[in-house]
Image: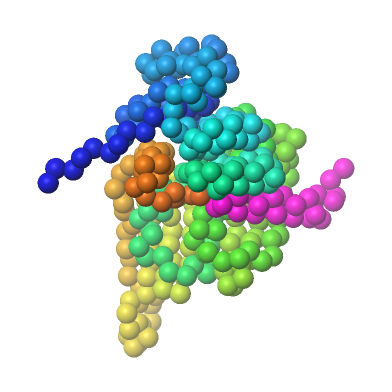
Amino acid sequence: MKQRPPRPVRVGVVGAGALGFHHIRLLKKIDGADLVGFYDHNAARSAQVAKELETTAFPSLDALLDRVDAVTVVVPTPAHVDVGLPVLERGLHALVEKPLADALPGAEQLVQTARERGLCLQVGHVERFNRAVRAAAPYLEEPRFLQTERLAPFQPRGTDVAVILDLMIHDLDLVLELVRSEVGEVRATGVPILTPHVDIANARVEFANGAVAIITASRVSRERTRKLRIFQPTGYFSLDLAQGDGHFYRLKSGWQGFGATKIEEIVEHVRLDAPEAEPLKLELESFLRAVRGDGDVVVTGAAGLQALALAYRVADAISASPLAAARP
């Protein structure tokens, strides 16, 4: 039987900056997305994007919201609540880019409003859709120790918040999803270098089940790096999130009886691979499926709120660290 095409969802984009541009570009091509258009407060930018992507720039947010069933919110973090709340209060589904908000009360308000109105609220933690993460998923089993490095050269975009909300929150969300246990102690240190906010940070997060995550994020590095290492009782993962691939070194069954003298004799190497796909496209497709009722929201508002709460615990730990106390 020929599969029927998905029911189109009338969708719009709020914000046509660097990332919003790609939301618009992809939604024009995704099956089941009826891209109505977008709104951006910058008239010159709106005209440029509308011409380049051959879509409609709406003159106001209200004008766009009058025409859609769902929107993706791709505005600067401090504006997420100001834009997201009117969207949800109109009864429209929303995908809000990460972090969910720049403060916990606003994030809680977004989650509560979506829950009360029975709406899909998805948070743009796009690393959940990373090819390497997807490839590792079938082999993951009780991660006990996780180590992440997310290093990037400096660029002005995103510096309206600390590196914890800009970059580290990607990995905070990932470790929360992978470990799935209550957070215990959080220790961290970090310093501002090129902005008034913390630009490089390191955190140690301990979980109630005994797992530990060491998380490093920097936006003042010479080279771009996105690594995730995971140790579990059955083996070790080395994931390159930038390349979208990785390796799993797992213990062979019955290895205790091998009488081995070298680790290579008891470890099997599995090269991790998953179908090639643009993570943002997968994220948008998952959102549309949830809006249609054909699937669950992958990164819920509650998950986004949990990641934000942990980010603020990291920020508080940095503020209380001896390094912070020693700064003039």
- Residue 266 in sight here: yes
| Residue 146, x across and y down, in percent | 53, 62
| Along the line of sight, the residue nearer the viewer: 229 or 67 | 67
| Residue 96, x across and y down, in percent | 53, 38
| Along the line of sight, the residue nearer the viewer: 284 or 216 | 284
| Residue 64, x across and y down, in percent | 49, 22
Name the quadrant containing residue 185. bottom right
- Based on the picture, tell me whether residue 105 belongs to the magenta stretch: no
**Majority SS type along the magenta span:** helix
Q: Quadrant of the C terminus?
A: top right
The residue at 48%/12% (across/down) is 47
The residue at 56%/52% (across/down) is 302
Q: In the shown orientation, is residue 24 left or right of residue 310?
A: left
- Residue 202 in sight here: no
What's drawn in magenta, residue-wise?
302-328
The residue at 53%/11% (across/down) is 44
Q: In the shown orientation, is residue 24 left or right of residue 146?
A: left
| Along the line of sight, the residue nearer the viewer: 141 or 188 | 141
| Residue 202, x across and y down, in percent | 65, 53
Q: In the shown orientation, is residue 163 left or right of residue 88?
A: right
Q: Total label count? A: 0
| Along the line of sight, the residue nearer the viewer: 60 or 241 | 60
Q: Is residue 65 above or below residue 202?
A: above
Q: Is residue 135 above or below residue 59?
A: below
